[in-house]
Amino acid sequence: MDIYGTKQIRNVVLLGHGGAGKTTVAEALAYLTGVTKRMGKVADGNTISDYDKEEIKRQFSISTTMVPIEYEGAEGKIKINLLDTPGYFDFVGEVEEAVSAADAAIIVVNCKAGIEVGTEKAWDLCEEYKLPRIIFVTNMDDDHASFRELILKLEKKFGRKIAPFQVPIRENEKFVGFVNAVKMQGRRFTNLSDYEDCEIPEYTKKNLGIIRDALIEAVAETSEEYMERYFSGEEFTQDEIYTAVQTHVCDGSIVPVMMGSGINCQGFNALLNAIDRYFPSPDKGECVGVDVSNGEHFTAKYNDEVSLSARVFKTIVDPFIGKYSLMKVCTGTLKPDSTLYNVNKDTEEKIAKVYVLRGKDVIEVPELKAGDIGAVAKLSVTQTGDTIALRSAPIVYHKPKISTPYTYMRFAAKTKGDEDKISSALARMMEEDLTLRVVNDTENRQSLLYGIGDQQLEVTVSKLLGRYKVDVELSKPKFAFRETIRRKVEAPGRYKKQSGGHGQFGDVKMSFEPSGDLETPYIFEEKVFGGAVPKNYFPAVEKGVQECCTKGPLAGYPVVGIKATLLDGSYHPVDSSEMAFKMAATLAFKKGFMDANPVLLEPIASVKVVVPDKFTGDVMGDLNRRRGRVLGMNSLHGGKQEIVADVPMSEMFGYNTDLRSMTGGIGVFSYEFSRYEQAPGDVQKKEVEARTAGGEVEA
C-alpha cells in the first residue's frame, strides 16, 4: 500500500441500525476499488469486515473493522479508511471508539425500513462529535422502497440540513439509475456502479426542481457575494457549487442523501466521488489534549512535519493473530524500528513494524503520516485511550468516551479448575472491549460480568468457549441485602463447658437496640458495675459481636445499625477466658437479634431513564411495577425526558431488555447505589426461605 499524506486521507465511519447494510456498503466499496476480486456477502460469511467466527455464525458485526481502500479522486489518489461498526446497541463501545477516530461518517439507512432507532443514535453521535455526514440509502432495488417518502421522514426528523443529491430513476419498477441534482444530469447504470449519461425522465423533473432550488439556496448562503448573485438570477458554476457544498458538508449544515443497492453494487462510484469531494481530510480538524509539562489545554493541527504523537483508539487481542494497538497518528510520522513513549503509563515501548489492518489481513507499511490510521503489534503496557508521544514533548489526548455497562450476570466455570484460565481470557477480552467489566463480589461469594446488554454477555461466553476453550455458565446474581433490628431487647449469653482439667466459662447480659446509623455495622458500649465482668474480657465480648455482624442470624447477610451494650455478667477465676466470653457474647447476640424484630434491608438504586416524551407513561408505569418511586422528571433537548426514580436493586435485574422492548431501543438508563431501606414482608420471607434452603443460614 502506498504512503499517503494528510491531505490525501479520509477517515470515514459507517454508522446505522443493525441490518441496515453497513458491512455490505464496505464490501461494495472494497470490491469497486479493487481490494477484492469478488464481492462477499454477509449471509455467506465471506465479507472482509465480519471475519470473526461469532460474526459469521450470527450474521452481524460485533466489533469495529478497518477496511482501508485506495481511490483515484478528482485531484489524485486518496486513501479512505473505512471503519465498519456494529449496529446492535450492545456493542456501542466499538462504535464510540471508531467515531472518536473518524473525521466523517456515512449513516446507512435501509430505504424499506426507513428511520430506525440506530439511525437516530448514529445522528446523535455525529452531532456530539461534530462529524460531517452523508446519509446513504441502501436497498433501492426493493420494489416497495419509496425514496421520496424516506426523504420526507428524514426532513421531518432532522430538519433542513437534509439535502437529497440524487433522485431515483425507475423503469418497470426497477431501480436503473439516478439523476445527479448537483450536475443536473441523468445516470443509467451499465455494469454494477458504472453508469452512462441519460436523459432526465419527465416524471422526476418536478421533484428534482424542488431539490435543486434548495441546493442552490444553500450554496448562496455561503457568502454575501453568492447571495447577491442568487437574487439577481445569476447561475453558479459547477466548481462554485462543489466548493460551497464541501464547505457546508464539512461544517455540518448540509447532510447529502445518496442512494444505491448494496446487493447489486449500484451507486457506489457516486458515493466514492462524494467522499473524495465533500468529506474533509484530517488537516481540516484538530486534536485536543493536555500538555503534561505544564498542565495546559493543548490543540494541535494534523501535521506530519512536527514531532510524533498518536492516540490508541482500539485494541485487538486475538489468540491467533496476536495483540494489535490501533492508533490514529495526530502529528508527525510513525515509523518502524523506533521507540514510542507512552505518556499515560510513563513507559517506553519498542516497535518493530508498522501495519494497516484490512479485516483480518495485516499489511506492513513503511510509515504512517499524520491523520492516518494504522496498527502496531505486541505493545505490552499500552491500552485503548493511551497517548504515544516523545518524552521531550509529552501530550495526553482525550480518551474516547465509552458507555458505562449496567447489565450484569453472575458467572461461574462449568469445569472446576478453569477459574484461572477464565480470568486470564476475560482480562484479554476486557482489553479489547472497554464496556466489559468483571467484579469480584466477595460478600456474596460470586463473580459478576458487566456489559451493555444480555446479547453482549452471551457473545462473550460464546467467545470464551470458541477462542479460549473455557466453558462459563451465566446465572442470576445474588443481591447484597443487609440485616438490622427494629426494637430494643435484653438477652443473656452463658457459655459453659466442662471437661477434664480447665473448663470454659463466660456469662454476659447484653442489650441490643437500633443505632440509627445504617452505614456502620455496630456500636459497642459497656455499662458493667462492680467488676461483674473484668475489663480484660471487654474486647473479647466486642469481638463476639463483631463476628456475628459479618453473617446475621436472619438470612446470613451482614448486620448494620445495631448498638450492643454489655450490662452485666459473671466470671470464674480459673475457667473464664477470652474465648469463653466471645462465645457468650455470640449466644447473647443470636438470641437478642431474633427477639428484636429483625428485618432485611434491601439496596436501593437511584435510577435515571432518558426516553422520548411518548414513552414516559409506559416507563413510569413499569418503574412502579418494580416497586420504584418516581421522584420527578427533567425535560431534555430533542423532545426527551429524564425520569428520576428510586428502585430496589433486585428489581433492576433484566431492566435493559425490558426498557429496549418498551421503547424500541431508544431508551437509555443509568443508576448508582443510593442507600438501604427495609424490604417488604413478602420479599423478606422469600429471601429468608431461599437462604435457609441454600444452607446460608442455620435452620
Image (cartoon, rainbow, N blue to C red):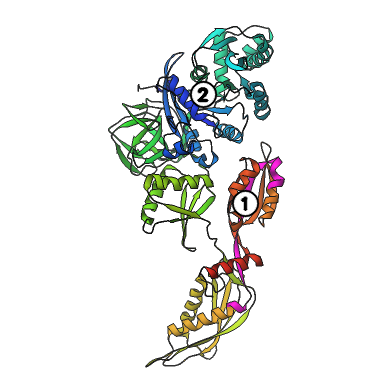
Name the residue rendered at 56%, 67% in the picture. 690
| Pair 2/1: label in front | 2
Classify residue 431 by image quadrant: top left
Quadrant where the N terminus sits is: top left
- Of mark 2 and mark 1, the one earlier in the sequence is 2
Residue 235, x across and y down, in percent: 63, 7
> Which secondary structure lies at badge 2?
loop
Residue 33 seen in the figure:
yes
> Which secondary structure lies at badge 1?
strand
> 390 left or right of 456?
left
Name the residue rendered at 66%, 30% in the picture. 157
Q: Is residue 135 above or below residue 571?
A: above
Q: Which mark is residue 162?
A: none
Residue 434, x across and y down, in percent: 46, 44
- How far apart marks 2 and 1 lie (CA) works out to 44 Å
Classify residue 247 by image quadrant: top right
| Label 1 sits on residue | 607
> 342 left or right of 582?
left
Nearer to me, 547 or 695: 695
Residue 519, x across and y down, in percent: 56, 65
Q: Which mark is residue 263?
A: 2
Quadrant where the C terminus sits is: bottom right
Tell me the amino acid under the disc marked 2: Ile
Residue 7 seen in the figure:
no
Q: Which residues are magenta?
A: 593-618
Tell me the amino acid under the disc marked 1: Val
Residue 409, x across and y down, in percent: 51, 53
